[in-house]
Image (tube, grey):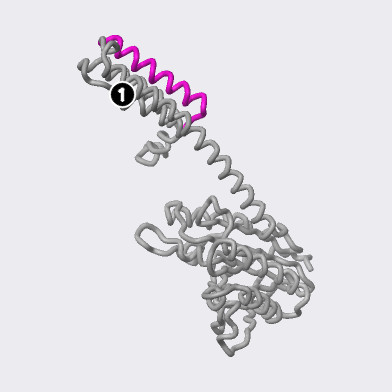
Amino acid sequence: MRSPSAGPTGVWRWCLRHVGWLPLLLLVGGALLDYHTAPHFSAEALYTAAPMTAAALLSLRATVLAGIGACIADFALLTHFGFMDDSGGRSELAAVATVSAFAVLVNRLMYYSDVRLQSARKVALAVQSAVLPEPPASVGSFRIAVRYQAAVRDAQIGGDLYGVQDTPYGVRCLVGDVRGKGMDAVKAVDVALGVFREAADDEPTLVGVAARLERALRREADRRAGLERTEGFVTGALAEIPHSGGELRLVNRGHPAPLLLHGGRVRCAEPSEPALPLGLAGLGTGEDRIDTVPFPQGSTLLLYTDGLTEARDRAGVFYDPVAGLTGREFPGPDALLDALLTDVSRHTGGCISDDMALLAVTWDAGPGSA
């Protein structure tokens, strides 16, 4: 029976785990090759490769030791073959010493670059925590889980958003996707979530919440110039679950349809009428419509952005969450989202092309729940 680590993937992982030994292998291999070949053959390339490899992979101390080791090995072999008295031998040793010194400089530059990168990651995480705070793990009889995965890992945050609010009208949720990237997208996310948190408590209907979001995003767009003013928009799906459960109310503004999971079955809650994204209502004449669908005990609502359905494998096939989740049952929303991210990673080979926000709400009402 084959080991799970057998095959090309297992070999590659083993190499990654032991890559720190590469500078030493280059030194030893170079010295042996130099010693057992013709006198005029030189392993200078291997000697210089050792400190440069250490500079990229290891610490400053290891880089210095690799450079010293390269110079000692080259000096010893040049002396053994009697080339230290000749200009060619001295030039070779000077070249190895120069590359070793340069490797130390490269190591320091990479170190400070990594420090700046780690600082940028911390700032991004702080922005994400401020703009996209973690919702409560539960509200009454509802368990809640969210996940956010940026296409650019170092970015940590992009234009996708989610929000959950416990209100007098029930648990209200928002998942959206801002057109564009960068700081403009983050500003739009901040505006949308700020308005959602306020409107969710004040407005008696989801239509009113959507209207408040529309006005706020249009004001934000009016502050911009050029194409961004006319083309900026946010696709969004609003959901409301009464505290007593039993049904689900939805307003969809140009966003991927939510999924309802129950007993291994997956239902796509398509809107009864298509609607323009938030920020573009002025281009149409229709009003928002609330769709009501059953939400029995044990059901899970899954809201997501198009990063999920646009995740592609090497053949260009899109991931289908309905097919991927049908016939499966999960103990809770966290398990569902973890399994979904694992499926997407497996489908794409770990390379997603767009940000992805996921929000799941499971109704776990017991017999005596209100």
Question: Who's the residue at 45% across and 63% down the image?
Answer: 319
Residue 98 % position (x, y): 39, 25
Answer above or below: position of 120 versus 48.
below
Count of residue discs? 1
User: Looking at the image, which residue is at 59% across and 67% down?
Assistant: 303
Residue 214 appears in the rendering = yes
Residue 36 % position (x, y)? 24, 15
Q: What residue type is disc 1 on?
A: Glu
Quadrant showing the C terminus: bottom right
Label 1: which residue?
Answer: 44
Q: Position of residue 185 (x, y in %)?
A: 58, 65
Q: Classify the position of the N terminus by image quarter.
A: top left
Who is closer to the viewer here, 180 or 7? 180
Q: Can the viewer see residue 336?
A: no
**Residue situated in front as seen by the camera: 71 or 358:** 71
User: Magenta segment range?
Assistant: 57-81
